[in-house]
């Protein structure tokens, strides 16, 4: 056997070690995808926050409520409210995902008719989660009906869905897709703005010009933002008129939140371009850094409330997590400014932080 195969092998190993993009593709990408999908792809619905409105406060209502409160694996009891309006407010603000309502004379009506009904008001903005919550409620009440207690009682549940009453999964999918695209597309486009100048060599004109770093990056930012706003307008029209997703909220809140989100996406793309010299590597890097985390950790695929503490912490570092919450609040809930202020302020903070980091890491000098 000749030494040629060995020579080829040695050559390929040396070229691989000298090529950061190949190393990234061969080793880092599979490891990263394994970690991201392993932690992020969870379809379990657990620790669902809920409240109870007990207008009867009878032995029967307290007994049934205890079945839900004590089920700590699937439910997270947030307290008792005095009336429906208080619980409805928490439901609109996203503090809970459903509440149980025991009407007045709940036990008395049972004793007369031998059958009684409680009401479950469920957040339907995430249809899959809403259906699972309903099934949990039905299982608990069915088990209660079959258990031994002082009356031969039969409890039935009247379930009502809010914020997407028909549980149209497509509405949520379209809104979630809007959030994903408006991070990925602007970030990818912005990442190519600087790397294409590096690749062509025109970046040297910038290095030797008197233009300041902030001026150069701001120009790139504004240009990419204009393109992103045009895309947002097109996709928004498709959302409203092609997919017929109803918009119930405030256009001003939506516009401000979207502006900060697009600024964040563009800034992130410019930030990444500081570390790449080729357009293909910038493209691959920006897609990996935006698409996979946003898809798994934003609440697009599974409810964030079902994630464990580690995954939940990761999700709060993803801008799409906050923007998707804002979109669901405005498209489905007609949430007021108070309910969306946290998301809007966080997106602004993301933009200021990332753009500042972009300015600090940009080197306005000739490469050695």
Image: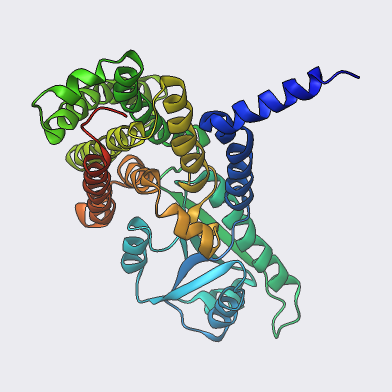
| Along the viewing direction, whichever of 288 and 16 lies nearer the viewer | 16
Q: Point out residue 220 in the picture as x, y percentages from the top left corner.
A: 21, 26
Identify the image quadrant of residue 342: bottom left
Residue at image x 16%, y 31%? 218
Q: State whether residue 122 appears in this view.
A: no
Name the residue located 22 percent from the left edge and 27 percent from the top edge.
225
Rendering coords of residue 116 (x, y %): 58, 69
Farthest-out residue, front: 3
Report the residue at 73% width, 20% height from top: 8
Q: In this view, does 69 lie to the left or right of 97?
A: right
300 horizontally vs 197: left or right: right
The x and y percentages for residue 188 are 38, 27
The single residue placed furthest to the left in the displayed view is: 210
Q: In this view, does 69 lie above or below 45?
A: below
* 117 vs 199, nearest the viewer: 199
Please state, as top left, top right, bottom left or bottom right, where the N terminus lies in the image: top right
Number of marks drawn: 0
Q: In which quarter of the image is the C terminus?
A: top left
Asked whether residue 335 is in view, the answer is yes
Q: Please determine whether, in this image, residue 230 is positioned above or below residue 32.
A: above
Task: Indicate the position of residue 185 as horizontal and vertical percent values.
Answer: 38, 26
Q: Which residue is drawn at 67% across and 24% down?
A: 11
Placement of 220 over or under 271, stated as above or below: above
């Amino acid at each position: 056997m000749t030494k040629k195969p060995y020579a080829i092998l040695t050559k390929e190993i040396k070229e691989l070690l000298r090529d950061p993009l190949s190393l990234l593709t061969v080793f880092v990408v599979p490891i990263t995808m394994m970690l991201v999908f392993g932690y992020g792809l969870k379809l379990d619905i657990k620790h669902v926050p809920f409240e109870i409105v007990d207008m009867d406060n009878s032995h029967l209502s307290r007994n049934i409520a205890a079945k839900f409160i004590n089920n700590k694996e699937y439910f997270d009891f947030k307290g008792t409210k005095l009336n429906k309006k208080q619980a409805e407010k928490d439901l609109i603000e996203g503090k809970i995902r459903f509440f149980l309502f025991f009407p007045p004379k709940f036990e008395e009506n049972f004793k007369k008719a031998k059958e009684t009904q409680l009401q479950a008001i469920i957040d339907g903005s995430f249809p899959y989660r809403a259906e699972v919550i309903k099934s949990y409620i039905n299982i608990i009440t069915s088990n209660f009906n079959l258990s031994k207690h002082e009356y031969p009682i039969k409890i039935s549940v009247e379930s009502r869905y809010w914020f997407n009453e028909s549980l149209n999964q497509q509405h949520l999918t379209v809104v979630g897709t809007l959030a994903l695209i408006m991070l990925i597309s602007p970030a990818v486009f912005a990442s190519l703005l600087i790397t294409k100048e590096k690749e062509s060599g025109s970046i040297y004109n910038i290095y030797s010009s008197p233009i300041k770093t902030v001026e150069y990056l701001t120009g790139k930012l504004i240009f990419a933002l204009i393109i992103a706003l045009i895309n947002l307008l097109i996709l928004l029209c498709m959302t409203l008129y092609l997919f017929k997703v109803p918009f119930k909220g405030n256009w001003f809140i939506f516009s401000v939140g979207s502006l900060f989100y697009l600024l964040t996406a563009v800034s992130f793309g410019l930030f990444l371009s500081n570390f790449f010299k080729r357009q293909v590597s910038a493209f691959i890097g920006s897609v990996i850094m935006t698409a996979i985390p946003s898809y798994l950790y934003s609440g697009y695929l599974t409810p964030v409330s079902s994630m464990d503490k580690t995954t939940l912490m990761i999700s709060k570092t993803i801008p799409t997590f906050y923007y998707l919450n804002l979109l669901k609040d405005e498209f489905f809930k007609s949430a007021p400014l108070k309910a969306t202020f946290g998301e809007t302020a966080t997106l602004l903070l993301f933009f200021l932080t990332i753009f500042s980091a972009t300015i600090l890491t940009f080197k306005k000098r000739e490469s050695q």
